[in-house]
Amino acid sequence: MSDLIDQVASNPLGRIAYRTLRPLVHLTRRLSHPGLPNNRQITKVAYRGRQFRLQHRRWNKSDLLAIDQCFRDLQYELPTGAHGALVEKVYSGILASGRQPLIVDCGANLGASVTWFSARYPEAHIVGIEPAPDNFDFLTHNCAGLDVDLRQAGIAPKAGRAWLHDTGDSAMGYRITSCPDKIAVDLVTMDDLLATKPASRYAPFLLKIDIEGAERDLFTGNEAVFNSFPLIIIEPHDWMFPGELSSLDFFRFHAAAGREFSMKRENVVSIAAQSGR
């Protein structure tokens, strides 16, 4: 839609037509979605019989990309084959034990991944972690009514305070930084997070990590807590930050823990070996 508007507004007659029709377009939007600001829109998605109306920034390509990657490309529908069967066995085993499978989504953005996980694993309890205030506002709205625990924070090897840097590229490009002139954000550790989820009720199942290069430091913390998740899905960001070795400690952890490996497009999957026993 944004490309169409750019084309229309690229000539004098198109700009006049757009300015003339814009009030009517805004009125139609208000009537269709009362209370929805003009700078937001709703995209309807569905998976496994579950339907969602996801709010996002109007004509924001990164928001639409996040939604498409989850619900059209099914980027988190992995692993498949024999590994997929093993993961299903682990999931069913947790349910049979009387506990809820625990999913932790680090870098939950506007909630497309959280809603998709809730449809794919409907019995799971999901923790969504997102540090950016604007993204967290969408995340809260889009996940209303789901079995979720949403935290406006960054995930890190040590708890404390850091700052959030908006690269200006997109809402998917926020980075944690030590520069104090940015947006202040709390940091939580995986140990502290799991301490709020008693083992008598929850069992770690899936850890998703998409934190724009901050994985460089994350796996310098307590590796045992990460190894408690049978399935880890991570997007490495070496391509974004060449020379910084962002994913080095993750792969060191993966190899040292004797975990198995799979991948799909930009996502790497680490599977605990005991999943197959």
Image: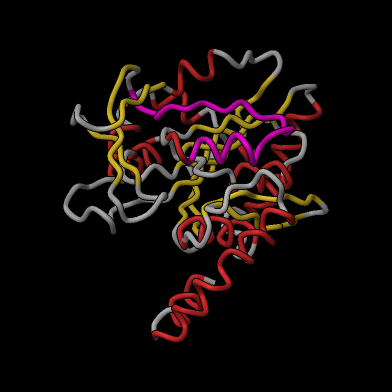
Residue 45 horizontal side relative to residue 59, left or right: right
Q: Nearer the viewer, residue 61 or 74?
A: 61
Q: Residue at x 19, y 30 (%)?
A: 181
Q: Nearer the viewer, residue 182 or 116?
A: 182
Q: 89 above or below 268? A: above
Residue 10 is situated, as x and y percent measured from the top left of the image, at: 39, 82
Q: Nearer the viewer, residue 32 or 240?
A: 32
Quadrant housing residue 133: top left
Q: 102 above or below 233? A: above
Q: 81 above or below 276? A: below
Number of callouts = 0
Residue 172 horizontal side relative to residue 48, left or right: left
Quadrant housing residue 166: top left
Q: Magenta stretch? A: 135-157
Residue 237 is situated, as x and y percent measured from the top left of the image, at: 32, 52
Residue 238 is situated, as x and y percent measured from the top left of the image, at: 28, 54
